[in-house]
Protein backbone atom coordinates (compact mmCIF):
# COMPACT_ATOMS: atom_id res chain seq x y z
CA UNK A 1 0.00 0.00 0.00
CA UNK A 2 1.27 3.46 -0.84
CA UNK A 3 2.61 5.56 2.01
CA UNK A 4 -0.06 7.63 3.67
CA UNK A 5 -2.99 5.53 2.39
CA UNK A 6 -4.87 3.93 5.26
CA UNK A 7 -3.91 3.70 8.89
CA UNK A 8 -4.83 0.13 9.67
CA UNK A 9 -2.64 -2.93 10.21
CA UNK A 10 -0.62 -4.42 7.39
CA UNK A 11 -2.03 -6.94 4.94
CA UNK A 12 -0.08 -9.76 6.56
CA UNK A 13 -1.38 -8.81 10.00
CA UNK A 14 -4.96 -8.73 8.75
CA UNK A 15 -4.61 -12.15 7.15
CA UNK A 16 -3.05 -13.52 10.32
CA UNK A 17 -6.02 -12.21 12.29
CA UNK A 18 -8.39 -13.87 9.83
CA UNK A 19 -6.51 -17.15 10.18
CA UNK A 20 -6.89 -16.94 13.94
CA UNK A 21 -10.61 -16.29 13.58
CA UNK A 22 -10.96 -19.29 11.27
CA UNK A 23 -9.47 -21.50 13.96
CA UNK A 24 -12.75 -21.06 15.86
CA UNK A 25 -14.85 -22.33 12.94
CA UNK A 26 -16.07 -25.88 12.53
CA UNK A 27 -13.94 -27.70 9.93
CA UNK A 28 -15.34 -27.41 6.41
CA UNK A 29 -13.36 -30.36 5.08
CA UNK A 30 -12.77 -33.89 6.28
CA UNK A 31 -16.29 -35.08 6.99
CA UNK A 32 -16.51 -33.83 10.59
CA UNK A 33 -19.51 -31.54 10.00
CA UNK A 34 -22.55 -33.41 8.70
CA UNK A 35 -24.61 -30.34 7.77
CA UNK A 36 -24.08 -27.01 6.01
CA UNK A 37 -20.91 -28.04 4.12
CA UNK A 38 -20.58 -30.30 1.07
CA UNK A 39 -17.10 -31.71 0.75
CA UNK A 40 -16.31 -33.72 -2.38
CA UNK A 41 -13.08 -34.90 -0.82
CA UNK A 42 -11.23 -33.84 -3.97
CA UNK A 43 -8.62 -31.13 -3.41
CA UNK A 44 -8.43 -30.62 -7.16
CA UNK A 45 -12.02 -29.38 -7.24
CA UNK A 46 -11.39 -26.91 -4.43
CA UNK A 47 -8.38 -25.50 -6.26
CA UNK A 48 -10.27 -25.32 -9.55
CA UNK A 49 -13.16 -23.51 -7.88
CA UNK A 50 -10.79 -21.07 -6.19
CA UNK A 51 -8.99 -20.23 -9.42
CA UNK A 52 -12.19 -19.87 -11.45
CA UNK A 53 -13.74 -17.65 -8.78
CA UNK A 54 -10.65 -15.42 -8.63
CA UNK A 55 -10.52 -15.10 -12.43
CA UNK A 56 -14.07 -13.69 -12.44
CA UNK A 57 -13.97 -11.74 -9.15
CA UNK A 58 -14.10 -8.24 -10.74
CA UNK A 59 -17.12 -9.04 -12.93
CA UNK A 60 -20.66 -7.86 -12.26
CA UNK A 61 -23.12 -10.54 -13.35
CA UNK A 62 -25.83 -7.87 -13.46
CA UNK A 63 -25.07 -7.24 -17.12
CA UNK A 64 -24.09 -10.19 -19.35
CA UNK A 65 -24.06 -7.86 -22.36
CA UNK A 66 -21.02 -6.11 -20.87
CA UNK A 67 -19.53 -9.37 -19.53
CA UNK A 68 -20.56 -12.04 -22.07
CA UNK A 69 -18.55 -14.71 -20.24
CA UNK A 70 -21.31 -14.64 -17.62
CA UNK A 71 -23.96 -15.53 -20.20
CA UNK A 72 -21.82 -18.34 -21.62
CA UNK A 73 -21.16 -19.92 -18.23
CA UNK A 74 -24.80 -19.63 -17.20
CA UNK A 75 -25.95 -21.18 -20.46
CA UNK A 76 -23.58 -24.13 -19.99
CA UNK A 77 -24.70 -24.70 -16.40
CA UNK A 78 -28.38 -24.55 -17.33
CA UNK A 79 -27.87 -26.96 -20.21
CA UNK A 80 -26.19 -29.49 -17.90
CA UNK A 81 -28.91 -29.13 -15.28
CA UNK A 82 -31.69 -29.39 -17.87
CA UNK A 83 -30.36 -32.75 -18.99
CA UNK A 84 -29.73 -33.95 -15.42
CA UNK A 85 -33.29 -33.07 -14.41
CA UNK A 86 -35.03 -34.67 -17.40
CA UNK A 87 -35.76 -31.41 -19.22
CA UNK A 88 -36.55 -30.60 -22.82
CA UNK A 89 -39.66 -29.70 -24.88
CA UNK A 90 -42.55 -31.80 -23.59
CA UNK A 91 -46.31 -31.79 -23.71
CA UNK A 92 -46.45 -28.62 -25.82
CA UNK A 93 -45.28 -26.46 -22.93
CA UNK A 94 -42.02 -25.35 -24.52
CA UNK A 95 -38.41 -25.95 -23.54
CA UNK A 96 -37.06 -26.08 -20.01
CA UNK A 97 -35.25 -22.79 -19.38
CA UNK A 98 -34.12 -20.96 -16.26
CA UNK A 99 -31.60 -18.91 -14.32
CA UNK A 100 -28.68 -19.27 -11.95
CA UNK A 101 -29.51 -17.74 -8.57
CA UNK A 102 -27.62 -16.90 -5.37
CA UNK A 103 -28.84 -19.97 -3.50
CA UNK A 104 -31.72 -22.24 -2.64
CA UNK A 105 -33.70 -19.63 -0.79
CA UNK A 106 -33.63 -17.26 -3.76
CA UNK A 107 -34.61 -20.10 -6.11
CA UNK A 108 -37.57 -21.00 -3.87
CA UNK A 109 -38.63 -17.36 -3.50
CA UNK A 110 -38.56 -16.86 -7.26
CA UNK A 111 -40.52 -20.06 -7.89
CA UNK A 112 -43.28 -18.79 -5.62
CA UNK A 113 -43.18 -15.22 -6.97
CA UNK A 114 -43.40 -16.49 -10.55
CA UNK A 115 -46.34 -18.79 -9.82
CA UNK A 116 -48.16 -16.03 -7.93
CA UNK A 117 -47.75 -13.54 -10.77
CA UNK A 118 -48.94 -16.05 -13.38
CA UNK A 119 -51.91 -17.01 -11.19
CA UNK A 120 -52.88 -13.34 -10.85
CA UNK A 121 -52.61 -12.82 -14.61
CA UNK A 122 -54.70 -15.90 -15.35
CA UNK A 123 -57.28 -15.41 -12.57
CA UNK A 124 -57.90 -11.65 -12.24
CA UNK A 125 -61.52 -11.99 -11.13
CA UNK A 126 -60.76 -14.57 -8.45
CA UNK A 127 -57.79 -12.51 -7.25
CA UNK A 128 -60.03 -9.49 -6.86
CA UNK A 129 -62.75 -11.51 -5.14
CA UNK A 130 -60.30 -12.87 -2.58
CA UNK A 131 -58.89 -9.42 -1.95
CA UNK A 132 -62.37 -8.00 -1.31
CA UNK A 133 -63.05 -10.82 1.14
CA UNK A 134 -59.78 -10.16 2.98
CA UNK A 135 -58.40 -13.54 1.94
CA UNK A 136 -55.10 -14.42 0.36
CA UNK A 137 -54.26 -16.99 -2.33
CA UNK A 138 -52.71 -20.14 -0.92
CA UNK A 139 -49.29 -21.77 -1.15
CA UNK A 140 -49.57 -25.51 -0.49
CA UNK A 141 -46.53 -27.50 0.68
CA UNK A 142 -45.87 -30.49 2.91
CA UNK A 143 -45.18 -29.59 6.53
CA UNK A 144 -41.60 -30.78 5.92
CA UNK A 145 -41.00 -28.41 2.98
CA UNK A 146 -38.08 -26.05 3.49
CA UNK A 147 -38.81 -22.97 5.60
CA UNK A 148 -37.87 -20.81 2.59
CA UNK A 149 -41.42 -21.39 1.37
CA UNK A 150 -42.85 -19.95 4.57
CA UNK A 151 -40.62 -16.94 4.00
CA UNK A 152 -41.90 -16.70 0.42
CA UNK A 153 -45.51 -16.77 1.60
CA UNK A 154 -44.84 -13.87 3.97
CA UNK A 155 -42.94 -11.85 1.40
CA UNK A 156 -45.44 -12.35 -1.42
CA UNK A 157 -48.63 -12.05 0.62
CA UNK A 158 -49.81 -15.64 0.38
CA UNK A 159 -51.40 -17.94 2.92
CA UNK A 160 -49.09 -20.89 3.66
CA UNK A 161 -51.29 -23.99 3.90
CA UNK A 162 -49.14 -26.97 4.97
CA UNK A 163 -50.13 -30.56 4.26
CA UNK A 164 -49.69 -32.61 7.46
CA UNK A 165 -47.19 -35.45 7.47
CA UNK A 166 -47.33 -38.86 9.07
CA UNK A 167 -45.30 -39.36 12.28
CA UNK A 168 -42.49 -40.87 10.17
CA UNK A 169 -42.22 -37.68 8.11
CA UNK A 170 -43.86 -39.10 4.97
CA UNK A 171 -46.74 -37.26 3.31
CA UNK A 172 -49.64 -38.83 1.40
CA UNK A 173 -50.75 -37.69 -2.05
CA UNK A 174 -54.39 -37.85 -0.92
CA UNK A 175 -53.65 -35.23 1.74
CA UNK A 176 -52.31 -32.91 -0.95
CA UNK A 177 -55.45 -33.51 -3.01
CA UNK A 178 -57.60 -32.31 -0.15
CA UNK A 179 -55.81 -28.93 -0.20
CA UNK A 180 -56.03 -28.19 -3.92
CA UNK A 181 -58.42 -25.59 -5.30
CA UNK A 182 -58.78 -22.57 -7.55
CA UNK A 183 -57.16 -20.25 -4.98
CA UNK A 184 -53.90 -22.23 -4.87
CA UNK A 185 -51.10 -20.46 -6.74
CA UNK A 186 -48.50 -23.20 -6.30
CA UNK A 187 -48.12 -26.66 -4.82
CA UNK A 188 -44.62 -27.65 -3.68
CA UNK A 189 -43.17 -31.15 -3.32
CA UNK A 190 -39.65 -31.99 -2.11
CA UNK A 191 -37.02 -34.32 -3.54
CA UNK A 192 -36.10 -35.08 -0.86
CA UNK A 193 -37.43 -33.21 2.17
CA UNK A 194 -34.41 -32.01 4.13
CA UNK A 195 -35.65 -32.92 7.64
CA UNK A 196 -36.61 -36.52 6.86
CA UNK A 197 -34.84 -37.44 3.64
CA UNK A 198 -38.16 -38.67 2.22
CA UNK A 199 -39.13 -37.92 -1.38
CA UNK A 200 -42.68 -36.57 -1.58
CA UNK A 201 -45.16 -38.34 -3.94
CA UNK A 202 -44.19 -36.14 -6.88
CA UNK A 203 -45.92 -38.08 -9.67
CA UNK A 204 -49.32 -38.24 -8.00
CA UNK A 205 -49.26 -34.66 -6.70
CA UNK A 206 -48.07 -33.23 -10.01
CA UNK A 207 -50.81 -35.10 -11.85
CA UNK A 208 -53.46 -33.70 -9.51
CA UNK A 209 -52.02 -30.22 -9.82
CA UNK A 210 -52.07 -30.50 -13.62
CA UNK A 211 -55.74 -31.52 -13.57
CA UNK A 212 -56.55 -28.47 -11.41
CA UNK A 213 -54.41 -26.20 -13.62
CA UNK A 214 -52.09 -25.44 -10.68
CA UNK A 215 -48.35 -24.87 -10.97
CA UNK A 216 -46.25 -27.61 -9.31
CA UNK A 217 -42.72 -26.93 -8.07
CA UNK A 218 -40.22 -29.61 -7.08
CA UNK A 219 -37.80 -28.35 -4.45
CA UNK A 220 -34.67 -30.34 -5.25
CA UNK A 221 -32.30 -27.79 -3.75
CA UNK A 222 -30.85 -30.58 -1.61
CA UNK A 223 -31.16 -33.53 -3.96
CA UNK A 224 -30.98 -32.04 -7.45
CA UNK A 225 -27.36 -32.97 -8.07
CA UNK A 226 -27.38 -36.34 -6.37
CA UNK A 227 -30.79 -37.98 -6.96
CA UNK A 228 -30.27 -38.22 -10.76
CA UNK A 229 -27.57 -40.82 -9.98
CA UNK A 230 -29.11 -42.35 -6.84
CA UNK A 231 -30.31 -45.93 -7.48
CA UNK A 232 -33.92 -46.93 -7.02
CA UNK A 233 -35.56 -43.50 -7.17
CA UNK A 234 -38.91 -43.00 -8.87
CA UNK A 235 -39.46 -40.24 -11.42
CA UNK A 236 -39.59 -36.84 -9.70
CA UNK A 237 -38.20 -34.33 -12.23
CA UNK A 238 -39.28 -32.84 -15.58
CA UNK A 239 -40.07 -36.32 -16.85
CA UNK A 240 -43.23 -35.94 -14.77
CA UNK A 241 -45.72 -34.00 -16.96
CA UNK A 242 -47.26 -31.85 -14.23
CA UNK A 243 -43.96 -30.51 -12.88
CA UNK A 244 -43.64 -26.86 -13.94
CA UNK A 245 -40.44 -25.80 -12.13
CA UNK A 246 -37.51 -27.27 -10.19
CA UNK A 247 -34.91 -25.70 -7.90
CA UNK A 248 -31.50 -27.35 -7.40
CA UNK A 249 -28.47 -26.02 -5.53
CA UNK A 250 -25.05 -26.00 -7.15
CA UNK A 251 -23.36 -25.28 -3.81
CA UNK A 252 -24.64 -28.49 -2.25
CA UNK A 253 -23.97 -31.67 -4.20
CA UNK A 254 -22.68 -29.62 -7.12
CA UNK A 255 -19.72 -28.98 -4.75
CA UNK A 256 -19.45 -25.30 -5.75
CA UNK A 257 -18.75 -22.50 -3.26
CA UNK A 258 -21.77 -20.69 -1.85
CA UNK A 259 -23.94 -19.28 -3.16
CA UNK A 260 -25.12 -20.77 -6.42
CA UNK A 261 -28.37 -22.49 -7.35
CA UNK A 262 -30.57 -22.92 -10.39
CA UNK A 263 -34.29 -22.44 -10.96
CA UNK A 264 -35.64 -24.15 -14.07
CA UNK A 265 -39.10 -23.62 -15.58
CA UNK A 266 -41.08 -25.56 -18.13
CA UNK A 267 -41.73 -22.99 -20.86
CA UNK A 268 -40.50 -19.49 -21.66
CA UNK A 269 -43.63 -17.70 -20.45
CA UNK A 270 -43.11 -19.04 -16.95
CA UNK A 271 -39.44 -18.12 -16.95
CA UNK A 272 -40.05 -14.59 -18.21
CA UNK A 273 -42.59 -14.04 -15.42
CA UNK A 274 -39.67 -14.47 -13.03
CA UNK A 275 -37.98 -11.29 -14.36
CA UNK A 276 -38.18 -7.73 -13.10
CA UNK A 277 -37.75 -5.10 -15.84
CA UNK A 278 -38.28 -1.35 -15.93
CA UNK A 279 -37.46 1.60 -18.14
CA UNK A 280 -39.46 3.95 -15.92
CA UNK A 281 -36.55 5.84 -14.45
CA UNK A 282 -33.87 8.08 -15.96
CA UNK A 283 -31.02 5.60 -15.56
CA UNK A 284 -30.04 2.53 -17.53
CA UNK A 285 -32.78 -0.01 -18.33
CA UNK A 286 -33.00 -2.43 -15.40
CA UNK A 287 -33.65 -6.06 -16.28
CA UNK A 288 -33.13 -8.56 -13.43
CA UNK A 289 -33.86 -12.26 -13.84
CA UNK A 290 -33.38 -12.79 -10.09
CA UNK A 291 -33.95 -10.85 -6.88
CA UNK A 292 -30.42 -9.45 -6.89
CA UNK A 293 -29.25 -6.57 -9.04
CA UNK A 294 -25.47 -6.44 -8.89
CA UNK A 295 -24.17 -9.90 -8.13
CA UNK A 296 -20.85 -11.72 -8.14
CA UNK A 297 -19.84 -13.94 -11.03
CA UNK A 298 -17.41 -15.95 -8.88
CA UNK A 299 -19.87 -18.58 -7.55
CA UNK A 300 -21.23 -19.13 -11.07
CA UNK A 301 -17.71 -19.48 -12.48
CA UNK A 302 -16.71 -21.95 -9.77
CA UNK A 303 -19.86 -24.01 -10.34
CA UNK A 304 -19.33 -23.94 -14.09
CA UNK A 305 -15.71 -25.08 -13.75
CA UNK A 306 -16.55 -27.95 -11.39
CA UNK A 307 -19.42 -29.07 -13.60
CA UNK A 308 -17.16 -29.08 -16.66
CA UNK A 309 -14.52 -31.07 -14.77
CA UNK A 310 -16.83 -33.70 -13.28
CA UNK A 311 -19.42 -34.22 -15.98
CA UNK A 312 -22.22 -36.70 -15.44
CA UNK A 313 -19.80 -39.60 -14.82
CA UNK A 314 -18.00 -37.67 -12.08
CA UNK A 315 -21.23 -36.87 -10.28
CA UNK A 316 -22.26 -40.51 -10.57
CA UNK A 317 -19.02 -41.63 -8.90
CA UNK A 318 -19.34 -39.13 -6.06
CA UNK A 319 -22.98 -40.10 -5.56
CA UNK A 320 -22.03 -43.77 -5.35
CA UNK A 321 -19.82 -42.91 -2.37
CA UNK A 322 -22.75 -41.15 -0.69
CA UNK A 323 -24.96 -44.20 -1.29
CA UNK A 324 -22.44 -46.50 0.39
CA UNK A 325 -22.06 -44.17 3.37
CA UNK A 326 -25.80 -43.69 3.81
CA UNK A 327 -26.28 -47.47 3.90
CA UNK A 328 -23.61 -47.85 6.59
CA UNK A 329 -24.90 -44.97 8.72
CA UNK A 330 -28.49 -46.26 8.64
CA UNK A 331 -27.30 -49.75 9.54
CA UNK A 332 -25.14 -48.47 12.42
CA UNK A 333 -27.93 -46.21 13.74
CA UNK A 334 -30.36 -49.14 13.70
CA UNK A 335 -27.91 -51.12 15.86
CA UNK A 336 -27.76 -48.43 18.57
CA UNK A 337 -30.13 -49.42 21.36
CA UNK A 338 -32.54 -46.60 22.05
CA UNK A 339 -32.16 -44.97 18.63
CA UNK A 340 -33.85 -45.39 15.24
CA UNK A 341 -33.60 -43.96 11.74
CA UNK A 342 -36.57 -41.64 11.18
CA UNK A 343 -38.82 -42.81 8.35
CA UNK A 344 -37.51 -44.16 5.06
CA UNK A 345 -34.96 -41.71 3.60
CA UNK A 346 -33.91 -41.79 -0.05
CA UNK A 347 -30.76 -39.83 -0.68
CA UNK A 348 -27.95 -38.28 1.36
CA UNK A 349 -30.12 -37.07 4.27
CA UNK A 350 -30.56 -39.31 7.31
CA UNK A 351 -32.30 -38.31 10.53
CA UNK A 352 -32.15 -40.27 13.78
CA UNK A 353 -34.93 -40.37 16.37
CA UNK A 354 -35.55 -41.82 19.82
CA UNK A 355 -36.80 -45.41 19.92
CA UNK A 356 -39.89 -44.72 22.01
CA UNK A 357 -40.78 -48.42 22.09
CA UNK A 358 -38.19 -48.93 24.82
CA UNK A 359 -38.31 -47.88 28.50
CA UNK A 360 -37.15 -44.29 29.07
CA UNK A 361 -34.04 -45.55 30.82
CA UNK A 362 -32.91 -47.15 27.55
CA UNK A 363 -33.91 -44.38 25.15
CA UNK A 364 -31.36 -42.15 23.39
CA UNK A 365 -32.40 -38.54 22.89
CA UNK A 366 -31.09 -37.35 19.48
CA UNK A 367 -30.35 -33.82 20.72
CA UNK A 368 -28.30 -35.05 23.68
CA UNK A 369 -26.64 -37.39 21.18
CA UNK A 370 -25.76 -34.44 18.92
CA UNK A 371 -24.31 -32.46 21.83
CA UNK A 372 -22.16 -35.42 22.91
CA UNK A 373 -21.01 -36.15 19.36
CA UNK A 374 -19.72 -32.57 19.12
CA UNK A 375 -17.32 -33.31 22.00
CA UNK A 376 -16.13 -36.37 20.06
CA UNK A 377 -15.33 -34.35 16.95
CA UNK A 378 -18.49 -34.78 14.85
CA UNK A 379 -21.27 -32.24 14.40
CA UNK A 380 -24.78 -33.24 13.42
CA UNK A 381 -27.81 -30.96 13.33
CA UNK A 382 -30.55 -30.59 15.96
CA UNK A 383 -34.08 -30.62 14.49
CA UNK A 384 -36.89 -29.66 16.88
CA UNK A 385 -40.14 -31.56 16.85
CA UNK A 386 -43.50 -29.86 16.51
CA UNK A 387 -47.19 -30.56 16.60
CA UNK A 388 -49.00 -30.07 13.28
CA UNK A 389 -52.38 -28.33 13.01
CA UNK A 390 -54.11 -31.73 12.82
CA UNK A 391 -52.58 -32.75 16.15
CA UNK A 392 -50.08 -35.25 14.72
CA UNK A 393 -46.68 -34.63 16.25
CA UNK A 394 -43.43 -34.89 14.33
CA UNK A 395 -40.65 -35.96 16.70
CA UNK A 396 -37.46 -34.09 17.43
CA UNK A 397 -34.58 -35.61 15.49
CA UNK A 398 -30.94 -35.10 14.57
CA UNK A 399 -29.95 -34.69 10.91
CA UNK A 400 -26.88 -36.03 9.11
CA UNK A 401 -25.92 -34.86 5.62
CA UNK A 402 -23.78 -37.50 3.90
CA UNK A 403 -21.15 -36.29 1.42
CA UNK A 404 -18.46 -38.19 -0.52
CA UNK A 405 -15.86 -37.49 2.14
CA UNK A 406 -18.06 -39.17 4.77
CA UNK A 407 -16.87 -42.54 3.52
CA UNK A 408 -13.35 -41.82 4.77
CA UNK A 409 -14.57 -41.23 8.33
CA UNK A 410 -17.10 -44.06 8.61
CA UNK A 411 -15.24 -46.27 11.12
CA UNK A 412 -14.53 -43.32 13.42
CA UNK A 413 -18.01 -41.87 12.96
CA UNK A 414 -19.66 -45.21 13.75
CA UNK A 415 -17.56 -45.61 16.89
CA UNK A 416 -18.39 -42.05 17.98
CA UNK A 417 -22.09 -42.67 17.35
CA UNK A 418 -22.10 -45.71 19.62
CA UNK A 419 -19.97 -44.02 22.29
CA UNK A 420 -22.14 -40.90 22.35
CA UNK A 421 -25.30 -42.98 22.60
CA UNK A 422 -23.87 -44.96 25.51
CA UNK A 423 -23.00 -41.69 27.27
CA UNK A 424 -26.49 -40.15 27.03
CA UNK A 425 -28.75 -43.20 27.10
CA UNK A 426 -31.60 -42.60 29.52
CA UNK A 427 -30.85 -38.89 29.95
CA UNK A 428 -34.15 -36.97 30.13
CA UNK A 429 -34.90 -33.94 27.94
CA UNK A 430 -35.96 -31.64 30.80
CA UNK A 431 -33.90 -28.51 31.37
CA UNK A 432 -33.43 -28.21 35.13
CA UNK A 433 -32.19 -24.61 34.89
CA UNK A 434 -35.35 -23.22 33.35
CA UNK A 435 -38.75 -24.40 34.50
CA UNK A 436 -41.61 -24.01 32.04
CA UNK A 437 -43.78 -22.96 34.95
CA UNK A 438 -41.61 -19.90 35.54
CA UNK A 439 -42.32 -18.70 32.01
CA UNK A 440 -46.02 -19.32 32.56
CA UNK A 441 -45.90 -17.08 35.60
CA UNK A 442 -44.16 -14.35 33.59
CA UNK A 443 -46.74 -14.66 30.82
CA UNK A 444 -44.43 -15.99 28.12
CA UNK A 445 -46.05 -19.42 27.97
CA UNK A 446 -49.75 -20.33 28.03
CA UNK A 447 -51.02 -21.81 31.29
CA UNK A 448 -53.35 -24.08 29.35
CA UNK A 449 -53.68 -25.27 25.78
CA UNK A 450 -54.74 -22.32 23.64
CA UNK A 451 -54.18 -19.84 26.49
CA UNK A 452 -52.78 -16.36 26.12
CA UNK A 453 -49.09 -15.50 26.17
CA UNK A 454 -46.79 -12.56 25.52
CA UNK A 455 -43.91 -12.33 23.08
CA UNK A 456 -40.79 -11.26 24.98
CA UNK A 457 -38.94 -8.06 24.16
CA UNK A 458 -35.30 -8.36 23.04
CA UNK A 459 -34.05 -7.64 26.57
CA UNK A 460 -36.42 -10.13 28.20
CA UNK A 461 -35.62 -12.74 25.54
CA UNK A 462 -31.95 -12.36 26.38
CA UNK A 463 -32.63 -12.76 30.11
CA UNK A 464 -34.46 -15.99 29.42
CA UNK A 465 -31.69 -17.22 27.14
CA UNK A 466 -29.04 -16.53 29.76
CA UNK A 467 -30.97 -18.64 32.25
CA UNK A 468 -31.05 -21.36 29.57
CA UNK A 469 -27.26 -21.32 29.32
CA UNK A 470 -26.50 -18.69 26.68
CA UNK A 471 -24.01 -15.88 27.06
CA UNK A 472 -21.19 -17.77 28.75
CA UNK A 473 -17.47 -18.05 27.97
CA UNK A 474 -17.36 -15.00 25.71
CA UNK A 475 -20.08 -16.20 23.34
CA UNK A 476 -23.81 -15.61 23.09
CA UNK A 477 -24.32 -19.26 22.17
CA UNK A 478 -25.07 -21.90 24.82
CA UNK A 479 -22.54 -24.67 25.28
CA UNK A 480 -25.20 -27.29 24.58
CA UNK A 481 -28.22 -26.94 22.31
CA UNK A 482 -30.38 -29.80 23.59
CA UNK A 483 -31.83 -27.87 26.60
CA UNK A 484 -32.58 -24.84 24.42
CA UNK A 485 -34.26 -26.99 21.75
CA UNK A 486 -36.38 -28.72 24.40
CA UNK A 487 -37.53 -25.37 25.73
CA UNK A 488 -38.25 -23.98 22.26
CA UNK A 489 -40.44 -26.99 21.44
CA UNK A 490 -42.63 -26.39 24.48
CA UNK A 491 -43.12 -22.68 23.92
CA UNK A 492 -45.62 -21.08 21.54
CA UNK A 493 -43.95 -20.58 18.15
CA UNK A 494 -43.87 -16.73 18.38
CA UNK A 495 -42.09 -16.92 21.77
CA UNK A 496 -39.60 -19.57 20.61
CA UNK A 497 -38.92 -17.59 17.43
CA UNK A 498 -38.28 -14.43 19.47
CA UNK A 499 -35.76 -16.29 21.64
CA UNK A 500 -33.92 -17.81 18.70
CA UNK A 501 -33.93 -14.49 16.84
CA UNK A 502 -32.34 -12.82 19.84
CA UNK A 503 -29.78 -15.59 20.16
CA UNK A 504 -28.60 -15.22 16.56
CA UNK A 505 -28.80 -11.42 16.61
CA UNK A 506 -26.50 -11.30 19.65
CA UNK A 507 -23.83 -13.32 17.84
CA UNK A 508 -22.78 -10.39 15.66
CA UNK A 509 -24.01 -7.49 17.74
CA UNK A 510 -21.15 -5.02 18.40
Image: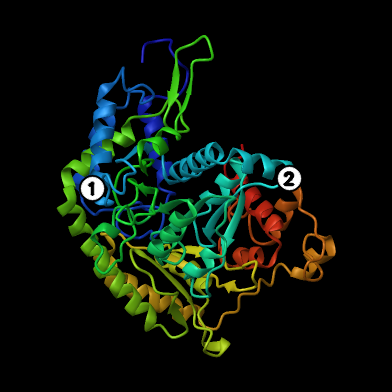
Q: Position of residue 265 (x, y in %)?
A: 37, 43
Could you tell me residue 391's position as x and y percent?
65, 73
Q: Is there CB contact under 8 Å for labels 1 and 2?
A: no
At numbered mark 2, what does the secondary structure look like: helix, strand or loop?
loop
Q: Residue 282 — which label?
A: none
Residue 478 is at least partly visible in this image: no
Task: Say if 186 sits above or below 346 in the image.
Answer: above
Vertical arrangement, residue 94 with respect to residue 180, above or below: above
Q: Secondary structure at mark 1?
A: helix
Point 37% across, 29% down: residue:
296
Question: Which residue was labeled with disc 1?
Answer: 83
> Is tag 1's residue or tag 2's residue first in the polypeptide sequence?
1
- Tell me which corner region of the image, top left, top right, bottom left or bottom right, holds residue 327: bottom left
Who is closer to the viewer here, 146 or 171? 171
Which residue is depicted at the point 82% across and 69% down? Answer: 447
Q: CA distance from mark 1 to mark 2?
A: 43 Å
Q: Position of residue 184 (x, y in %)?
A: 56, 51
Circle 1 packing at 10 Å, graded few (<14), some (14-19), many (20+), is: some
Q: Along the horizontal axis of the image, is 46 left or right of 18?
A: left
Compared across the picture, whether 241 is left or right of 287 comes to left
Q: In the depicted view, which residue is nearer to us: 109 or 469?
A: 109
User: Which mark is nearer the camera, 1 or 2?
Assistant: 2
Quarter the N terminus occupies: top left
| Residue 57 x, y percent position in the rendering | 32, 27
Q: Is residue 169 above or below residue 418?
A: above
Q: Residue at x 44, y 52 (%)?
A: 216
Disc number for residue 134:
2
Q: Residues within 10 Å of mark 2 (few under 14, many from 20)?
A: few
Amino acid sequence: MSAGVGSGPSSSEILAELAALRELDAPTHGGRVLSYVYDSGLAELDELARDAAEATRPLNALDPTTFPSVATMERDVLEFMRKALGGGPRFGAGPVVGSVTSGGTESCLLAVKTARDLWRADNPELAEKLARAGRRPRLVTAATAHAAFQKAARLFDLAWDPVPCQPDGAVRAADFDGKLGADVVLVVVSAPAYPSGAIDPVVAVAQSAKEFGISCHVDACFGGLVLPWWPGTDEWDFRVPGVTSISADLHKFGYAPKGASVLLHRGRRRHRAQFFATTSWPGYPVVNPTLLGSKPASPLAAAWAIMKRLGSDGYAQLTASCVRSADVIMREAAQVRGLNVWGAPTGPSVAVVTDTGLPESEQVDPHHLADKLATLGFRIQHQPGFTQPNGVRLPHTAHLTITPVTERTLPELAAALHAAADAVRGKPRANPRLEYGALQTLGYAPKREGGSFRVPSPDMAWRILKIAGAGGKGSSLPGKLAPLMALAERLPAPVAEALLTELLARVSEP
